[in-house]
Image (cartoon, rainbow, N blue to C red):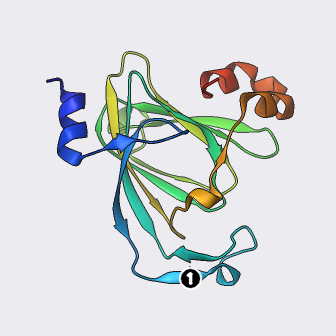
Amino acid sequence: MNETKKIIDILRLKPLPIEGGYYKEIFQSEHKINSGEISSEYSGKRLLYSTIYYLITVDTFSALHQLPGDEIFHFYKGDPVEMLNINEDGSHQIITIGNDILNGEIPQILVKGKVWQGCKLKSDGQYALLGTTMSPGFDYEDYVHGKKEDLLEKFPHLDFLIKRYTHS
């Protein structure tokens, strides 16, 4: 059994629908907060915080998506990850998440709410085990999947990147 499969089995990760990759919820707050205490981006109650393990492989990646709140990524193990962030004004950046700090990799990053985000392994990578932390906690109701056609229309100057970070 290869290392990627062992990690999936040991951590009991399952496929993440729509976005791609594998995940497992780890911690969730016992407390909820009302949307009025957060912002108008939310409706109903939300967990105070939530965390997951998140794994991408040669065959999977995190497709472009948007969340209303901030998300912190933590790098745990594996190969470096290239994360694409696209701001609403069309500016963008690619960040390398990993443990090789002396060569410009960052082991922990913050993705601000409303930023389009997606991540893939750097070329020749086999897998990357990450974690994410969100406050307020993640809720599928808040997830906006990036549709290739819509993103290309909105950000035509990012044609190559959008095609690389979307599923179809």
Instruction: Check disc 1: other Cα within 10 Å, few if <14, some if 14-19, many if 20+.
Output: some
Q: Is residue 107 visible?
A: yes
Which of the 4 image quarters holds residue 105?
A: top left
Mark 1: amino acid: Ile
Where in the figure is residue 138, as x and y percent of width and height? 52, 62
Query: Does residue 37 sit above or below 109 in this rendering?
Result: below
The answer to which of 20 and 72 lies nearer the viewer is 20
Left or right, residue 34 beside residue 147: left
Residue found 17% across the figure and 43% down from its top: 10
Seen as rendered, the residue at the extreme left is 1
Left or right, residue 6 beside residue 164: left
Residue found 70% across the figure and 83% down from its top: 36
All told, the count of numbered labels is: 1
Query: Does residue 142 sit above or below 152 in this rendering?
Result: below
Which of the 4 image quarters holds residue 15?
A: top left
Left or right, residue 116 beside residue 50: right
Kind of element beneath mark 1: strand
Q: Is residue 83 visible?
A: no
Seen as rendered, the residue at the extreme top is 124
Where in the figure is residue 75, as x and y percent of width and height? 35, 45
Query: Does residue 37 sit above or below 113 in this rendering?
Result: below
Left or right, residue 64 beside residue 127: right
Q: Which residue is mark 1?
A: 33
The answer to which of 76 and 139 lies nearer the viewer is 139
Q: State which quarter of the image contains the N terminus.
A: top left
Residue found 70% across the figure and 54% down from its top: 114
Residue found 64% across the figure and 23% down from its top: 168
The answer to which of 134 and 98 lies nearer the viewer is 134
Which of the 4 image quarters holds residue 157?
A: top right
Where in the figure is residue 54, as x and y percent of width and height? 38, 45
